[in-house]
Image (cartoon, rainbow, N blue to C red):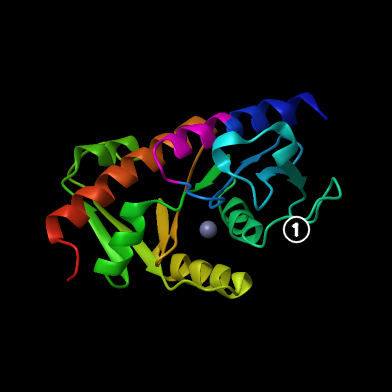
Amino acid sequence: MSGAFEIRARELIAAGKRLADQGWVPATSGNLSARLEDGTFAITVSGVHKGCLTLADIMRVDDRGRSLDGRRPSAETQLHLALYRRWPRVQAILHPHSPAAVLASRLFGGHLVLEDHELLKALDGIDTHAHRLVVPIFPNDQDIPRLADRVDRWIDENGDIHAYIIAGHGFYTWGDSVSSALVAVEALEFMFHCEVTLHGVRK
Ligand SMILES: [Zn+2]
């Protein structure tokens, strides 16, 4: 196990604990990943609780998603890799299954607009609350390549995003480090929660 892998893996383990403590990765849901300097990726294996990860629960894949250590990556690995391919600056991606993201997807169709939130400033490149952030909401899909294509097409047509929600499922966000991705998760979840509370849960 290389030193660089272990450093990133330990950051992912700590991030998993933080997300689990908030109830944002219930059961064995969610996945977490980080880019390594050699162009490979550390990512959580599927089927384990993200609140009690060990080094053995973080695997390594190449840029096509092929396992480098004999373990089988989860299908959602392809969603991570599509984001890494698009934006070289992205160093870590977190995918919680959080309640406010799921509720927001039930309440809002197509996309969610976040504006006039001080916490927008927690996201990379945003320095004022007076910003209109569109978070697309995609239908859930067990066909991951098809879902990845849909995300790619949306970004091609509409421009860069900071996060996307998968309806009834959770959301993806990212950053230039594991810690900045964690900040983005907390900020987004807070804003999702505010919007859901403001607009009311559908009866
Ligand atoms: Zn998921």
On the question of residue 40 being in view, the answer is: no
Residue at 68%, 25% in the rendered image: 7
User: Does the magenta stretch mainly form a helix, a strand or a loop?
Assistant: helix
Q: Quadrant of the C terminus?
A: bottom left
- In the picture, residue 185 is in which quadrant? top left
Residue at 15%, 46% in the rendered image: 116
Residue at 45%, 65% in the rendered image: 155
Name the side, left or right, on which 198 lies relative to 110.
left
Name the side, left or right, on which 135 lies relative to 40.
left
Quick one: which residue is furthest to the right in this view?
A: 70
Q: Is residue 5 magenta?
A: no
Q: Is residue 156 above or below residue 25?
A: below
* Residue 13 location (% of width, % of height): 60, 32
* Residue 95 location (% of width, % of height): 50, 50
Looking at numbered disc 1 in the image, what kind of residue is underneath it? Arg
Viewer-nearest residue: 150 or 167: 167
Q: Is residue 20 magenta?
A: yes
Q: Is mark 1 within 8 Å of ligand 1?
A: no
Q: Quadrant of the N terminus?
A: top right
Pointer 1 local density, CA inside 10 Å: few below 14, some 14–19, many at least 20: few
On the question of residue 24 being in view, the answer is: yes
* Residue 138 location (% of width, % of height): 42, 70
The residue at which mark 1 appears reads as 64
Q: Which portion, as a residue range, is magenta? A: 14-24
Viewer-nearest residue: 184 or 189: 189
* Residue 141 location (% of width, % of height): 52, 73
Q: Is residue 50 above or below residue 167?
A: above
